[in-house]
Image: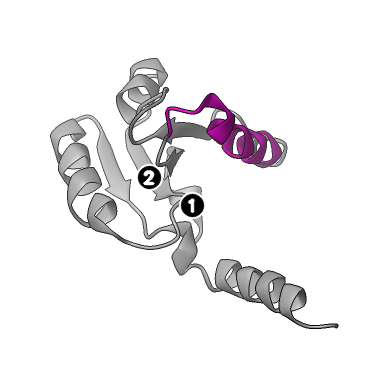
Amino acid sequence: MQLEQYDHIILLAHGSSDPRWKIPFEQLLARVTGVVSEDKVTLAYMELCKPSIEDVLAILPPETANIAVFPLFFAQGRHLRVDVPKQLEELNTEQRTLTLLNPIGDDPEVVSAMEKAITSKLTDD
């Protein structure tokens, strides 16, 4: 799925009270914005740290109407089946629609990369 159909993409990570936990996500965002405009993608956290989805929405221009939330989660647990959909439903307005995408862990390329990383650690190849 190409994300060009959206005005903005929010990459959603879980969050942690440990500030060091955010570093890989911030580095990922920096690499992504090196390819895709900073106006097109931001990073938010579901809980325990900032910015939240609400914080991101507050700084987006009002004309940013069609927003995708792309979870940087491996699988669809309770947060992605219940908590985040409820949150997005409450944040949707007549002027702004937030769409929850499948988590990055559902992407075959991600699964393949993880498989290769794991098997390379377990074999002599």
Dominant SS in magenta: helix
Where does the image place residue 91, in percent across and percent down from the top left?
19, 32
User: Magenta segment: does it hold 19?
Assistant: yes
Above or below for 117 versus 40: below
Q: Which mark is residue 34?
A: none
Q: Secondary structure at mark 2?
A: strand
Percent x, y of residue 117: 70, 69
- Amino acid marked by disc 1: Leu
Please, what is the three-letter code of the amino acid marked with disc 2?
Ala
Residue drawn 34% across and 36% down? 46
Asked if residue 113 lies left or right of residue 77, the reply is right
Q: Secondary structure at mark 1?
A: helix
Report which quarter residue 7 is drawn in.
top left
Query: Cβ–Cβ below 8 Å for labels 1 and 2?
Result: yes
Tell me residue 20's x, y (percent): 58, 29
Q: Where is residue 51 shown, x and y percent of the image? A: 42, 23
Tell me which colouring the rendered structure shows: one colour
Residues packed near mark 1 inside 10 Å, few (<14), some (14 to 19) or many (20 plus): few
Residue at horizontal 55%, vertical 32%? 22
Q: Which mark is residue 3?
A: 1
Residue topped by disc 2: 68
Left or right, 8 with reference to 115: left
Range of magenta residues = 16-31
Q: Is residue 93 visible?
A: no
